[in-house]
Image (cartoon, rainbow, N blue to C red):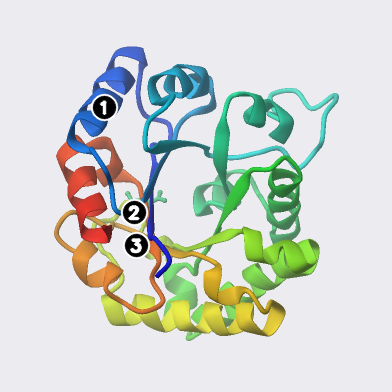
Amino acid sequence: MMKKLIAGNWKMNGNLVANELLIKGLLAGLLQPGCQVAVCVPSLYLAQIHSLLSGTAIDLGAQDVSQHEIGAYTGEIAGSMLKELGVRYAIVGHSERRQYHGETDVVVATKAQRALANGITPIVCVGESLAEREAGKTEEVVKRQLAAVIHANGHCISEVVVAYEPVWAIGTGRSATSEQAQHVHSVLRAQLRAASEHADRIKLLYGGSMNAANAKDLLAQPDIDGGLIGGAALKVQDFLTIIAAAS
Ligand code: PEP
């Protein structure tokens, strides 16, 4: 059976001292995890966390990658630069970047391409807003977002991780129910099956207020292969409990 993946998204949180405490706390509680574990940290701290994680069971992730290869793009970080710092995963298309930075489906798909070209696994986020859910458009929205990534990445689609993150559940404490999440995951799985013969090995993560209390139920669903965790990834014990639920 495929191992689940639990990835923490630290967002714009942390400092040198707090980061070290968090990582050391995780490593102390995580001897041989039965799932894959990653932390996606602010770019400025990638070097720090890279050295703290060296030789451990936790992989390093970034929260974004430039859609460009290299050059005059002030403030951007290229996939090749992330790779040099030992980055294994890069979140692309998080709803906060779609919302606050105007990232379109095409930009997100290009970012996924750039990550893959540099040997980094993109964690591609898709998800509907509350208004879209209430208008009955959930499937249409997530399928459109995923279709752009499938279109741009062709057969390499089997190398991506997809995270279903309903926007209304992110940071709100209001998780999707296991049934709601499983339903959307099954829709995404069917779309991936139509695009790739290897769709069953593509990890589909759920994200949106997953926590120590609800992780077990969510992770027990047949098409939920892990979690993308925001707030709870900043608390050692909560993150360890979620990892244990996935193991
Ligand atoms: C996220 O930001 O990807 C996320 C899932 O956040 P939270 O767990 O805090 O809802």
**In 3D space, how far apart are the residues under numbered discs 3 and 1 (Cα atoms)?**
24 Å
Up the image or down, 233 lies above or below 216; here it is: above
For marks 1 and 2 on the same chain, the one whose residue lies earlier in the sequence = 1
Mark 2: few, some, or many residues within 10 Å (few <14, many ≥20)? some
Q: Marks 1/2: CA distance?
A: 19 Å
Choose mark 3 or mark 1, whichever is in front. 1
- Decide: is 166 above or below 98: below
Q: Residue at x 49, y 64 (%)?
A: 203
User: How many circles with numbers are drawn on the protein?
Assistant: 3
- The amino acid on which the numbered mark 3 sits, given as a three-letter code, is Ala
Q: From the image, which quarter does the N terminus lie in?
A: bottom left
- Any mark on residue 169, and which? 3
Residue to which mark 2 is pinned: 35
Near-viewer residue (44 or 4): 4
Question: Between residues 240 and 32, which one lies in front from this camera angle?
Answer: 32
Q: Are marks 1 and 2 in contact (CB under 8 Å)?
A: no
For the residue labelled by badge 3, is the local secondary structure a helix, a strand or a loop?
helix
Q: Is residue 104 at least partly visible in the picture? A: yes
Among the 4 quarters of the image, the one containing residue 200: bottom right
What amino acid type is highlighted by mark number 1? Leu
Residue under label 1: 22
Q: Mark 2 is on which residue type?
A: Cys
Q: Quadrant of residue 88?
A: top right
Other residues around mark 1 within 10 Å, as few (<14) / some (14–19) / many (≥20): some
Q: Earlier in the sequence, mark 3 or mark 2?
A: 2
The picture places residue 52, in percent across and down from the top left corner, at 39, 20
Task: Give percent across and percent down for residue 97.
Answer: 57, 46
Using the image as rendered, state which of residue 155 and residue 212 is in the foreground. 155
Is residue 16 placed above or below 220 in the rendered structure?
above
Residue 89's mark? Answer: none
